[in-house]
Amino acid sequence: MHELGIVFYIVRDVLEAARENNVERVRTVVMDIGEVSTVVPHMLQDCWRWAADKEPVLKGCELKINTIPAVTVCHSCGLEYATTRYGKTCPGCKGADTVLLRGNEVEIKEIEV
């Protein structure tokens, strides 16, 4: 379960932003999590609740997660397609010269105070 380690980094970054901006209370943290990032959203939220409630600035803070769809592009024909449906093989030309464009993100998008 690497979600706990990720939560520690999120807490660190949010607390740092709160200190830099003289914020006494953070109400919501919004994350962008890619669907092929290997992060399990419900596990991340469970770990968040445990870790956030240990910090006075984050006590009761909600973690919202936006799921970013995985999209791959084929270098042979230029087609962009749903990664989770077709994997690394382009559904257009059946080529394998593909690369993931998005869907692997684990990013803090917003901090609401």
Image (cartoon, helix red, strand yellow):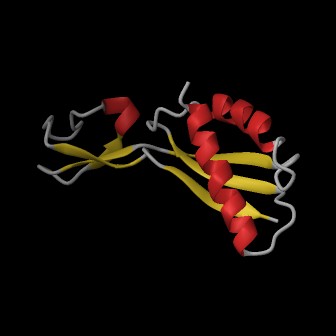
In the foreground, 22 or 37: 22
Q: Who's the residue at 70% across and 32% down the image? A: 47
Provide residue 81's location: percent of width, then percent of height. Answer: 33, 44
In the foreground, 22 or 107: 22
Tally of numbered discs: 0
Provide residue 26's location: percent of width, then percent of height. Answer: 82, 59
In the rendered view, does 41 fall on the left or right side of 104? right
In the foreground, 78 or 30: 30
Residue 37 drawn above or below residue 40: below
Q: Seen from this angle, which residue lies furthest top?
A: 1
Q: Who's the residue at 53% across and 34% down the image? A: 39
Quadrant hosting residue 37: top left
Quadrant including the N terminus: top right
In the rendered view, does 41 fall on the left or right side of 99? right
Residue 109 drawn above or below residue 3: below
In the rendered view, does 61 fall on the left or right side of 88? right
Quadrant hosting residue 83: top left
Q: Who's the residue at 66% across and 45% down the image? A: 65
In the foreground, 99 or 37: 37
Q: Seen from this angle, which residue lies furthest bottom?
A: 21
Quadrant hosting residue 85: top left
In the rendered view, does 87 fall on the left or right side of 28? left
Q: Who's the residue at 15% across and 51% down the image? A: 75
Residue 94 drawn above or below residue 99: above
Provide residue 110's location: percent of width, then percent of height. Answer: 67, 62
Quadrant including the C terminus: bottom right
